[in-house]
Image (tube, helix red, strand yellow):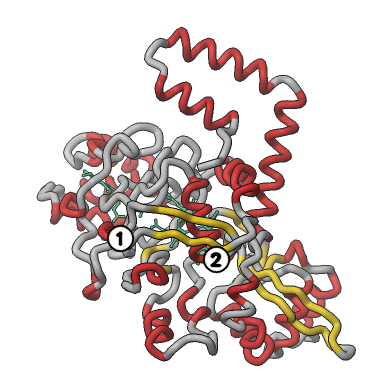
């Protein structure tokens, strides 16, 4: 990796590798001194600002795939009116809409059943995770290029205007989005490929299918709450977010850059010059590290039961043997064989997931904002937290009473 260590990362590794408190204390003092110098703060804040722009709007030049190969510009122009777009889980960002457009949508003057309206929204840069270039061709606004950004899968909106229309929530996985069904609209795919893409369903995506030809989608995970987690993806393939950001940008979004991974079977070597990815990775990572997990809504769990549940999590449930520390994970110190994981075997005859990864093992998922992102486990086999606890109780022979299970669920809701 060519990514430079950011000050934040240097701080974390200083903390985790230092055995002597005095050394850690010295680092802390130096960092506090640095962070109180105006230049330091401005630099890291502006790096995060750049990262936010990259996360929301950067395609890394992937239009060459989504336009020139998949012809999604034609698909959108011909058939994707805003109502259809919302129905496949695309989101509209109200902060990008001028008041006249907001009024027009409210009054019904703007036709949400007309693909031209989608083109108009793309021209305003208001479709979350989709970038369009709209040019005047013979007096008509025409979508000439289209590409995708990270926000497509890892942002949603707060629905404050209408379902699917509101303010951006970066890092929240879009579980309404059906990426497979969207890709399957491309005229460039064979019937067999379309059948695979259409089989994945909402909130699911297979980030290896185009490499190993196998199909076993995973739940789109949150991209928040990752500060301090030094193991990325369900299978802990990378030690920092930037590893996976490069993977997705180059191999899935088809942005321009390179990705090399000899641990995969078969090994993966993608070269798509010129490199538009590497230079953007530090800012992108800086922004992501700053996205905190959302707190549980007030009153969404029973506090007394959650306290009892915590004792079970650390005691009879044995959860904290793996979900350890403030990030609730024992990774990267330890990864787990598929046989230790309650979500295996895969549903619907899907191929074993970890075997398709670089580590062939599972990372203990850091638990964060669990209330926000059902379903659970890489393959989504547990639709609710009740189902998570049930699965652990059965497979790990915990013999919890129904009261204990209910308490454990309340604790999980509080994280
Ligand atoms: C088409 C949907 C899609 C897009 C676009 C996408 N991702 Fe993801 N992302 C996923 C899926 C699915 C996973 C889970 C993969 C795994 O763990 O094996 C994932 C995993 C991640 C993770 C790991 C989270 C964790 O818990 O370790 C991060 C971070 C992430 N993505 C960031 C990004 C960034 C940054 C971009 C843009 C460069 C991006 N993603 C683009 C679907 C997507
Ligand atoms: C042997 C280590 C281990 C133990 C013990 C363990 N977990 Fe896990 N946990 C994991 C791993 C590994 C995953 C990821 C598996 C996957 O995604 O399929 C996981 C995933 C989860 C998830 C899903 C998180 C998400 O965002 O999808 C929840 C919730 C969870 N565990 C709760 C618990 C609870 C509650 C207990 C105790 C009853 C427990 N775990 C015990 C290793 C463990």
**Residue depicted at x 24% and y 70%:** 347
Residue 148 x/y as whole percent: 61, 68
**Residue depicted at x 65% and y 65%:** 61
The residue carrying mark 1 is 265
Residue 60 x/y as whole percent: 64, 61
Mark 2 residue element: loop
Label 1 to label 2, Cα distance in Å?
20 Å
How crowded pointer 2 is (Cα within 10 Å; few <14, some 14-19, many 20+) is rated as: many
| Cβ atoms under marks 1 and 2 closer than 8 Å | no
Q: Judge whether 195 appears above or below 249 on screen.
A: below
Q: Judge whether 30 appears above or below 333 on screen.
A: above
Q: Outermost residue, right direction?
A: 139
Examine the image and state in which quarter residue 205 appears: bottom left
The residue carrying mark 2 is 253
Residue 340 x/y as whole percent: 17, 49
Mark 1 residue element: loop
Ligand 1 under 8 Å from disc 1 Cβ: no
**Residue depicted at x 70% and y 37%:** 45
Instruction: Decide which of tag 1 and tag 2 comes sooner along the chain.
Output: 2
């Amino acid at each position: 990796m060519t990514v430079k260590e950011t000050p934040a990362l240097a701080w974390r590794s200083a903390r985790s590798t230092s055995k002597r408190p005095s050394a850690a204390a010295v680092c802390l003092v130096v960092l506090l001194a640095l962070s109180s110098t105006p230049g330091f703060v401005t630099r890291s804040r502006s790096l995060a600002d750049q990262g936010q722009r990259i996360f929301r709007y950067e395609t890394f030049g992937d239009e060459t795939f989504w336009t020139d190969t998949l012809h999604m510009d034609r698909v959108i122009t011909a058939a994707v009116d805003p109502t259809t777009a919302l129905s496949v889980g695309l989101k509209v960002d109200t902060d990008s809409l001028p008041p006249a457009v907001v009024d027009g949508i409210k009054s019904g003057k703007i036709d949400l059943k007309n693909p031209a309206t989608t083109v108009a929204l793309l021209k305003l840069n208001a479709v979350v995770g989709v970038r369009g270039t709209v040019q005047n061709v013979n007096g008509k606004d025409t979508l000439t290029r289209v590409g995708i950004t990270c926000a497509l899968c890892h942002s949603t909106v707060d629905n404050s205007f209408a379902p699917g229309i509101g303010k951006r929530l970066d890092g929240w996985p879009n579980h309404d989005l059906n990426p497979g069904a969207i890709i399957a609209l491309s005229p460039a795919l064979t019937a067999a490929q379309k059948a695979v893409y259409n089989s994945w369903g909402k909130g699911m995506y297979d980030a290896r299918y185009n490499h190993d030809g196998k199909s076993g989608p995973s739940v789109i995970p949150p991209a928040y709450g990752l500060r301090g987690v030094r193991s990325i993806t369900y299978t802990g393939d990378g030690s920092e977010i930037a590893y996976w950001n490069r993977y997705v940008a180059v191999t899935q979004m088809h942005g321009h850059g390179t990705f090399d991974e000899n641990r995969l079977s078969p090994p993966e070597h993608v070269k798509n010059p010129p490199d538009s990815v590497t230079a953007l990775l530090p800012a992108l990572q800086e922004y992501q590290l700053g996205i905190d997990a959302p707190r549980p809504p007030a009153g969404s769990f029973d506090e007394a039961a959650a306290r009892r549940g915590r004792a079970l999590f650390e005691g009879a449930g044995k959860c904290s043997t793996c979900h350890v520390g403030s990030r609730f994970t024992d990774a990267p110190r330890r990864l787990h064989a598929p046989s230790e994981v309650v979500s295996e075997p895969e549903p619907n005859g899907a191929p074993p997931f970890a075997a398709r990864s670089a580590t062939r093992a599972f990372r203990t998922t850091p638990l964060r904002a669990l209330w926000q992102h059902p379903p659970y486990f890489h393959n989504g086999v547990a639709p609710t937290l009740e189902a998570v606890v049930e699965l652990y109780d059965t497979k790990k022979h915990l013999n919890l009473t129904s009261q204990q299970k209910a308490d454990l669920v309340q604790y999980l809701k509080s994280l």
